[in-house]
Structures are given as structure tokens and as C-alpha cells.
Image (cartoon, rainbow, N blue to C red):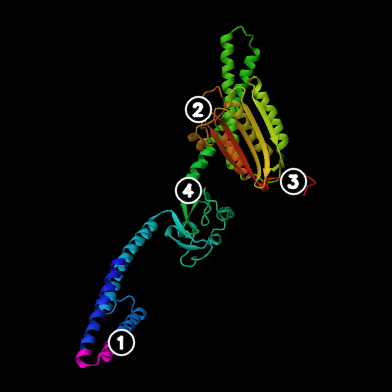
Amino acid sequence: MNANSSDTWIRTLLQKLFWLLLGCVLAGLLTGQLAWCLALGMGLYLVWTLRQMLRFHHWLRHHPKQPPPEARGIWGEIFDSIYHLQRNDARMRTRMQSVIDRVQSSTAALRDAVVMIDRKGDLEWWNPAAEQLLGLRAPDDSGQHVTNLIRDPRFVDYFELQNYSESLTIPSPVDESHWLHYSITRYGPGDRLMVVRDVTRLQHLEQMRRDFVANVSHELRTPLTVLVGYLETLLDADDGSQPRRQRALQQMQQQAERMQELLRDLLLLSRLESGNETQQQEVFDVSSGLQGLAQDARALSAERGHQIDLKISGNTLLHGSQAELQSAFSNLLFNAVKYTQNGGRIEMRWWQDEQGGHFEVSDNGPGIEERHLPRLTERFYRVDPSRNSATGGTGLGLAIVKHVLLRHDGNLEIHSTLGKGSRFSCHFPAQRLAQAPGTY
């Protein structure tokens, strides 16, 4: 009720009381019983008011969904206002129910599973596709915790970690030959909306791609090895009498070696993609590994005059594959040497804190435009679209780094400013750090 309506009601009530009192006064003057007439008039008005209040109370308790009772005077206006509110509420409920019905109809038509989960992790509602993809049953599973029904350890870890910035792809709990893509979005006070999509076809296509790359790489490795061998033999036997022939052989050898490097990276990437996470059995001494890489980087820099510094602090023992980690660290370091201008500065750092172990390569090179950063770890993605052979490389280095880190529970963080340099950081969780023998 707004202020204008309230003022109108007060005026109406005062007017009715005024006329009632006036009538009682006139009747009292005519009969000579002014006090009794006033008392009788006010008593009758009080009885009428109490009767209307009792009718109102009875209606609220027993028939609140029906129209309010009829009355005259101020109570009639009250009941009319309530009746109009009821009609507006009914219309609003009808519109809301129509929207809900349309939403439920649209979600029922979806092929993707939609599941509503409350703040405790219990299932509240799901569409029919969730019953097919996840095996949920209504109403038996309503109120059950989601991890009681989807028990894959990878999903349990993903759900309980509560970091839903990335999605999860695992086999279906109903049929392991099917692959499901889980994505969770927060909404409301702690509630979550989970959308599950069948990506079996995409997984099969991705597996076909990996198999194709691996098979082609294996098939090309032998003829390339033979070709490189014969080129080396021809160059060794060349007496230099035909400079044009010697230059052609040297160029052929350079391109064949680039092809071999590409095949090696493709085979390594294929093995990283097809393998599971690295077991925490082998221990890699980061300190000795980085010292060796620093020497290799200085040799690679040679006359380019880079200043290459190495800083190490904290625990340097890391659970993981020495070959894979060495490959990831060397890719980051050699990229910095390759793309930093002559005389530039390159710094390697390893440190430990409460979050785990961290390796970082930073330089003051030309930097990378921000629009390129999200795609740097894609296969064959090059910032330089011309693919200038002067810088070499296969375009697979950062893809290899990303997959190595994934296999070691780590992640890659890239910061770069055009004209000021770049910083590539590898972060490993604390459980990947190993204790030195004899320490506790």
C-alpha cells in the first residue's frame, strides 16, 4: 500500500467516525441522553469492527485462497484491496509457472545433462538426459550427494577441489566406452549447476589424430635417418671442387635435420599425450639439472653475448621423470636464448614456498603481444606468422612443456609485455617435492 492510499483510508475513517459521532450527538440532544447515545453508538461501532475482524481471521485461517468476505465501509475497502492483491498474485504466479514450464520443457529437450546441486553437494534436480548419461534415477537419487553416484576418483577430486575454471573429461559412469565432459558453474548462495556433454565422438577423433601423427612419425623416421646418413657420407666425400653442389648438399642436410627434430618432438608429444600421470617414484635433482642447462644455454648463446644467470633456493628434489622435466625446462630456456636480442639478459630461478616448487625463466627480449598468450601452448602455433627459419624450432616446444607439467600435476603461467620481455613460470604442488635422504 502506497502513501496516497494510506492517506485516503485515514481520511475516509475519520469522516465515518465524524458522521457517527455527529449522529450520536444529535440523537442525544433530542432525547436528552447525550452520554448514553455516545456510549451506545461507539459500542455498536466496536461490535461491528470486532465482527469484521473475526470474519477476517476466520478467512485467513480456513479459506486464504478464496476471495475475502464482503463488507461495507472501511472493512469493505480492506477486503477489496486484498482481493486485488490476490488477483495480481495469481496472474504473477501464472506467468512464473509458464516460464518454469518452458524452462523445464527446454531442458528436457536438451541432449546435454543438466544437474542442479545445492551448497552441500546434494542433488536437487536434473533433466531426463542426466538419467541417460549419468544413470540418475528419480526420485530415489534426489537428495543424494553427487559423489555417491559419480564415484570416479578424478571427478571426486575435481568436485571437492571446487576450482571449476577448467572442465573435466572422463569416461561415463554408465558406459566406460563413452566419454563425458563435465563443467560446473556456481550460482546463488553456494549452489552449483553441472552440465554434462557426451564427447565420445570428439575423443575418438582426437585419438585418431594422435594415432595418425604417431604412425606417420614412426614411418618417416627410418627414411629420414637413411637420407641424413647418405647426405653426411656425400658431404664427407666432397672435395670442395664443386661449391654449388656442396651448398646444395648442406642445405639438404639442414632441412633433413629439421625434419628429424620435428619428428622427435612429435613422437615425444604423442607419448606424453597417450601416457598417464607420472608416478612419484623417480626423483629429479633440479639443481644439478639446471646447472647443466645453464652451461648448454651459454654454449648455445656463444657470440650473441647473452647474460644468463641462475638462482636456486629451497628444496630442489622433485618427484617425476628426469627426462621429461629436463625437456620442459630446456625448451623454456632455449626459447629465451633463441628469441632474446644479442646482449640480452636471461634469468633462471628455482624456489620453494608453502605452495610447492617453482621454476621460472625470464628475459628482457622483445616480448609477446597479449593476444598471442592464450594460444602459445597450441601445437605449431607461432607468434611470427612467416615461420622464419632463422629462429628454427618446430612450434611444439611449449605444447611439450604444457603436457609435461600436466603429467607432473603442475601448470604453466605466462606473462609478457611487448618490448619489455617475457616470463614463463612452472608451478609444482608441494606433494611433488621430495625430501633429501636423511631428512625428516
Q: Give the residue furthest to the top.
A: 241
10 Å neighbourhood of mark 1: few (<14), some, or many (≥20)?
few
Bounds of the magenta segment: 28-46
Cα–Cα gap, marks 4 and 2: 33 Å
The numbered disc on residue 435 is 3
Disc 3/disc 1 C-alpha distance (Å): 89 Å
Q: How far apart are marks 1 and 4 (CA)?
A: 75 Å
Q: Is residue 123 among what the camera can see?
A: yes
Give the residue number, with chain letter if any, for mark 2. 384
Residue toward you, 242 or 358: 358
Q: Is residue 32 located in the magenta-colored stretch of the structure?
A: yes
* Residue designated by label 1: 47
Rate crowding at label 4 as few (under 14), some (14 to 19) or many (20 or more) other CA atoms within 10 Å. some
Identify which residue, 359 or 10, lies in the foreground: 10
Ranked by sequence position, the earlier of labels 4 and 2 is 4
In primary-sequence order, the first of circles 3 and 1 is 1
| Residue 70 seen by the camera | no
Residue 13: where, in percent of width, then height?
27, 76
Q: Quick one: SS at disc 4?
A: loop
Between label 2 and label 1, give the one nearer the viewer: 1
Task: Please give the residue where the numbered disc 4 appears in the rendered image.
Answer: 199
